[in-house]
Structures are given as C-alpha cells and as structure tokens.
Amino acid sequence: MLFHVRMDVQLPHDMPADRAATLKADEKARFQALQRSGQWRHIWRIVGQYSNVSVFDVDSPTQLHDLLMSLPLFPYMRIDVMPLCRHPSSLHDDDR
Ligand SMILES: O=C(O)C[C@H]1C=CC(=O)O1
C-alpha cells in the first residue's frame, strides 16, 4: 500500500544543540534503513521549510503508523497522511 506523507518538523527553540544533532543523526540512520528496506520509497524537501513529502510502501495502515511512531523526530513532527492507489492511466507498473 502506498501513502503520501507530509512531515513538518519543529524542534523546540530551547533544545540544546547537541541534543538536536543527536536526534537528527538518529533520524538519518533510521531513514536510510527504511529507504534500503523499500518502505520509504521517495522523499523530497519542501523548499524553504524543515518539511518533507514522502511516499511510503507498506503492508498496512498499522505498519505505517508504527513506522512513523518509531522515528526519532516523531515527537517533534506534525504528520499528514494520504492513502494512494494506482491511477488508471499511469504507465508505472509499480504504482499500486
Ligand atoms: O529532514 C526531515 O524532513 C525529517 C526527517 C525525514 C528524513 C530525515 O532524515 O529526517
């Protein structure tokens, strides 16, 4: 199942720089593992914002929920999710 996910990150202004750096490094490691697994299929930065739009390929809404909650930056994100299905005119066989 494919999901479009928008994540807006807002770290508290008073978070110590070393704590923020650790969180970002942990997030990057988790993100790259999920990319390698194929579950985090695409990501784009939204220009000028600490935000991204991503496409996830997971087995169920529950799996996506658990995956998002496992992200180190989860407590500092607003997350919006849209379920996707294949467009009938798409030329891409892997859109499902
Ligand atoms: O940078 C972000 O948008 C937040 C998050 C998503 C991937 C990642 O490495 O960090």
Image (cartoon, rainbow, N blue to C red):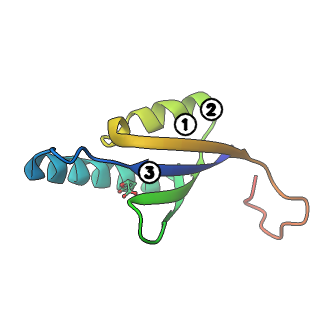
* Foreground disc of the pair 3, 1: 3
Label 1 crowd bin: few (<14), some (14–19), many (20+), radius 10 Å? many
> Which residue in the structure is indicated by mark 3?
8
Going by the numbered disc 3, the residue's amino acid type is: Asp
* Residues under numbered marks 3 and 2 in contact, where contact means CB atoms less than 8 Å apart: no
Q: Quadrant for residue 86, please give it.
A: bottom right
Residue 37 vertical placement versus 71 (above, below)? below
Secondary structure category for the residue under label 1: helix
Quarter of the rendered image showing ligand 1: bottom left
Secondary structure category for the residue under label 3: strand
Horizontal side, residue 66 vs residue 58: left or right: left
Disc 3/disc 1 C-alpha distance (Å): 17 Å
Secondary structure category for the residue under label 2: helix
Residue placed at 83% from the left, 70% from the top? 91
Residue placed at 34% from the left, 48% from the top? 10
Disc 2/disc 1 C-alpha distance (Å): 5 Å
The mark nearer the N terminus, 3 or 2, is 3
Residue placed at 38% from the left, 60% from the top? 50
Spot the residue most to the front.
Answer: 13
Residue 88 vertical placement versus 1 (above, below)? below
Q: How many marks?
A: 3
> Which residue in the structure is indicated by mark 2?
61
Residue placed at 46% from the left, 42% from the top? 78
Camera-side residue of 43 and 36: 43
Q: Would you say residue 70 is visible in this rendering?
A: yes
* Residues under numbered marks 2 and 1 in contact, where contact means CB atoms less than 8 Å apart: yes
